[in-house]
Amino acid sequence: MSASIIQIKNLYYTYSTNKKNVPVLHDINLNINHGEMIAIQGKSGSGKSTLLYLIGGTLKIKQGEILIANQNLCKLNSNELAQFRQKTLGFVFQQFHLLSHANVLENVLLPLSYSSTPSSTSATTFNKSNQISTILPTILNTLGIQDVVSHFPNELSGGQQQRTAIARALINDPQIILADEPTGNLDSKTSNEIITLFKELKAKNKTIIIVTHDNEIAKECDRIYHIQDGIIIEEITNKIAYQNNQTFLSNIATSNIVASNNGQQNEQNKQSFNSKYNILNLLSSVKKNLKQNKIRTLLTMIGITIGVASMISMVTLGLFTKSKVIESFSELGANIVNFNGYRNWELKASDITPVMFESFSYEKDLLPLKRIFPEIMAFTPTMMDWNVTVTHGANILEKDIRLNAMSADGWNIIEHKELLKGKYFNNFHVDDKSAVCIIGFDINKNLFKDDDSLGKIISIKANGDSQFVCKIIGVLKETSSNKDWLKPNNTIHLPFTFYLGNSRNFWQSQIRQFLIKTNPDADIELFGKKIKLFFEKKYGISGKFFIGYDSALLSQMEKVLTLFTIILGVLASICLTVGGVGVANMMMVSVAERYREIGIRKAIGASDQSIRLLFLSEAIIICFIAGIAGLFFGIVIYESIIFVASSFIPKIQFEWVFNYWALSISLISIIIVGILAGIIPAIKAERLQIIEALRAE
Ligand code: ADP
Ligand code: MG
């Protein structure tokens, strides 16, 4: 019983502010025994509070030592100190220091939300009502605040507020209670009630240190220390108090004041409840604060909403424009290279080349490409004939008829290929050099009128008197092209092998051109250059190789439009940054306004992390809600723009666009802005010295 619980050795303390040092405590040595009630008295400014806060681990010890319950406070880090406060100490202040936006019950329960070491073992079997039904009612009844649990501090008398604060100090069943002028703001009648409370606590074996001017309290203490200018000038052992306490003890021995710890089980239960309570408590305090400053929060959120809305709409519109422009300029598509090779007619006899280039060989030149360049998804030789006559029976078509010969892979590459009926030719047709063809919509219409064309044989006269017949196995749907000279509805598609075998025109009967479709990620310009280099190495100057005009131009256009989209995105991210600065600013103000709250939370055991988490989650929740609204408005904005554009520009049709790129960039930005906007205020809140925070009003 008389083992010392608090030992203070050679303790000095100096406040350092603005390069000025204020020495406050000088060589304090104290020994306080378990179960003692101690009074500290002295003039205002003598250092009493400083000493109390040092004992409470809320001020960093700079010189000397404090040992409490066998723990050396100097050796604990800030987390361990928070845990120590939470488990071992209960603070009671002159100004009560209740959270004004929380009711009595919430204030009393606040320390539970900062319990460490959550245990999951009994989480399922234990519940909140169990906790409340064992410890809480006893405390509330003892302190006489059971009828005001749903009141807010400004609805309570000073005495009730201080009782609430004491209940809060007791909820974790601490060994030590530190009270800084607990009756300083109370009338004498209420003071007496509080004194009685402290006596009851002492009877329950709590160690109590009370800083007080009130001699009525001091009289009841076992010992009184007098401090003057930071030095203990007097220690009075109070025999009367001791005797008083003995009689008091026997009087109340039967009454149940504070629920004591019911062993291991109860401790575990308490902790599992606490870990659940943590998140709920965090969310509810975030909600409360945001509600508290509705208009400010709303205005701040508008900044984020605008930023996110511009982000998603600009990026989506940029990418949308890009795809539309490329679509309208290309008959092929963005990731297709049109590659050409010709014999170099200017080659002199003296020019030595390893292999002479005449034309591409499907087996030797084209097939190996797929192995060498993994970005190739499909390729096809292509031969176009623009001077074609097609006949069926007595019907002849000879104006603007086109012929296109390719491999079965070609169907994966070319545009204007949707089937109306029948089927495409496949690899077997190509290998077999089958005499089959797929005809365009207009050919079908003009040659067959309403008759069924599938299976019919048509006769084709092509360049250089080549003449052959083939069977129609498919008809394409009607389609429109951006290019006048391309006549997709008047085109006949043939297997290139069949065409090569039947063409009598030297120029047309060789492979000089092929199309390659790359995977969407490949840089088409670079890829084209690589192919070109490959053939130049192989054939030297005997061949001339070049990339089709379309693909080169498109590739450049694509890059310009990508740049355009990036610029839009950067502009939008500036908007978003401004919004984020708004949130950070609001959070800074909020930290400044809530100094006292932060101090209270820390004093009752909130770790630095939990304070950081509180402010960080506020910022993130604000950004998230505003961001979701921004996404919604952004989609409305860009869809409206597309709608307006579609009514002015006939080429553009209204459509619902969801660009996953734009969406994910916006979502990621929301999270980043939330974290960045919260982190500085959160760190500021975390760094706050408890004693300064509590002194702020
Ligand atoms: P008491 O509680 O006995 O009235 P305090 O411990 O609050 O005294 O203060 C002791 C001395 O330290 C006072 O002179 C006060 O002005 C000074 N002091 C307190 N807090 C600070 C601080 N944060 N920075 C500088 N000086 C301080
Ligand atoms: Mg003081």
Image (cartoon, rainbow, N blue to C red):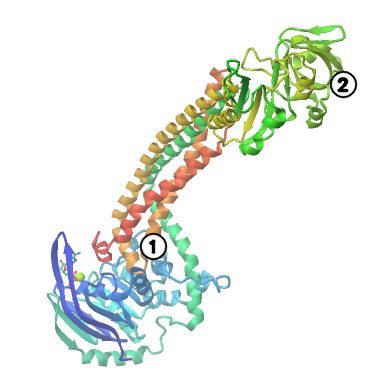
Kindly state the secondary structure of the residue where label 2 is placed: loop
| Residue that mark 2 sits on | 455
Kindly state the secondary structure of the residue where label 1 is placed: helix
Up/down of 471 relative to 246, above or below:
above
Name the quadrant containing residue 356: top right
Name the quadrant containing residue 169: bottom left
The location of residue 268, given as percent across then percent down, is 50, 76
Name the quadrant containing residue 595: bottom left
Q: Residue at x 61, y 25 (%)?
A: 339
Amino acid type at image mark 1: Gln
Q: Residue furthest front?
A: 350
Amino acid type at image mark 2: Gly
The location of residue 255, given as percent across then percent down, is 40, 86
Cβ at disc 2 under 8 Å from ligand 1:
no
Q: Is residue 399 left or right of residue 453?
A: left
The location of residue 649, given as percent across then percent down, is 55, 18
For residue 61, which numbered disc appears in the image? none
Q: Residue at x 26, y 85 (%)?
A: 32
